[in-house]
Image: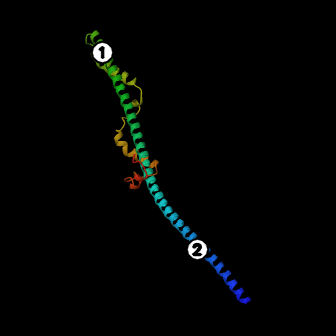
């Protein structure tokens, strides 16, 4: 009987231990299930963040393209403005030279008429000589870029050359085509300024 009671005691002890193992297994199963749910949530969050990151990259690339295009256009406009300023200076100088020539010719002609009048017309060629000498004196007194440089080309004709230079500075051969703003940029609060 002793053996039976030992066996019954062992059996009860085994049942208790088996119950503890089963309870522990249930707890572990619950933890595993919870960890799997958290891992699935993390995978979903990671995927959502990856989509957001991809959208931000597309928007940033679009903004960079627009910024590059703006830099190119600004360079072209600056070159056109500089060209127009130089042309304006040349024409102002040319106008002053023309004025000096006209004033010199007028003064020379006046002196020639005075000489012709004093001599009683016998020195009539003095009028022509006086006009020519006065014009030459007025023209030679002019200074500035217009006296050493030819008349500049219209700046509008220079635009293709300015465009090529601006593109070359950016390492391009043609103007970038940025297209329209990606739709996801609106959701990301990227402005279309």
Judged from the image, the secondary structure of the residue bearing numbered disc 1 is helix
**Mark 2 burial class by Cα count in 10 Å: few <14, some 14-19, many 20+:** few
- Does residue 72 appear anywhere in the picture? yes
Residue at 45 percent of width and 50 percent of height? 64
| x and y, in percent, of residue 179 in the image | 37, 54
* Badge 2 element: helix
State the residue position of label 2: 26
Which residue is painted at 37% across and 46% down in the image?
A: 160
- Identify the mark nearer the N-term, 2 or 1: 2
| Quadrant housing residue 133 | top left
In the image, farthest residue toward the left: 121
Residue 87 percent location from the top left of the image: 37, 34
Instruction: Estimate the spatial distance between the alpha carbons at disc 2 and disc 1, rounded to whole Å.
Output: 124 Å
- Residue 128's image quarter? top left
Residue 149 locus on image (x, y percent): 40, 34
Depth check, mark 2 against mark 1: the one in front is 2
Along the viewing direction, whichever of 103 and 11 lies nearer the viewer: 11
Find residue 127 and report its horizontal and vertical position in percent: 29, 17
When the figure is inspected, residue 32 is found, relative to residue 179, above or below; the finding is: below
Which residue is at the far front? Answer: 1
Query: Residue under circle 1?
Result: 110
Judging depth in this view, the residue of 160 and 33 nearest the camera is 33
Q: In the drawing, does residue 20 fall left or right of residue 165?
A: right
- Scheme of colours in the image: rainbow
């Amino acid at each position: 009987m002793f053996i039976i009671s030992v066996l019954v005691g062992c059996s009860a002890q085994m049942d208790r231990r088996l119950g503890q193992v089963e309870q522990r297994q249930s707890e572990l199963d619950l933890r595993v299930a919870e960890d799997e749910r958290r891992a699935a949530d993390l995978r979903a969050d990671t995927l959502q963040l990856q989509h957001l990151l991809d959208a931000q990259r597309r928007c940033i690339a679009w903004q960079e393209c627009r910024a590059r295009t703006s830099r190119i256009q600004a360079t072209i406009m600056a070159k056109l403005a500089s060209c127009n300023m130089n042309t304006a200076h040349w024409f102002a100088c040319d106008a002053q030279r023309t004025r000096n020539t006209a004033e010199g010719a007028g003064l020379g002609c006046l002196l020639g008429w005075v000489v012709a009048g004093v001599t009683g017309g016998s020195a009539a060629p003095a009028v022509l000589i006086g006009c020519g000498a006065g014009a030459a004196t007025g023209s030679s007194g002019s200074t500035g870029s217009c006296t050493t440089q030819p008349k500049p080309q219209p700046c509008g004709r220079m635009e293709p050359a300015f465009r090529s230079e601006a593109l070359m500075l950016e390492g391009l051969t043609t103007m970038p085509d940025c297209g329209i703003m990606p739709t996801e940029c609106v959701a990301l609060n990227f402005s279309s300024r």
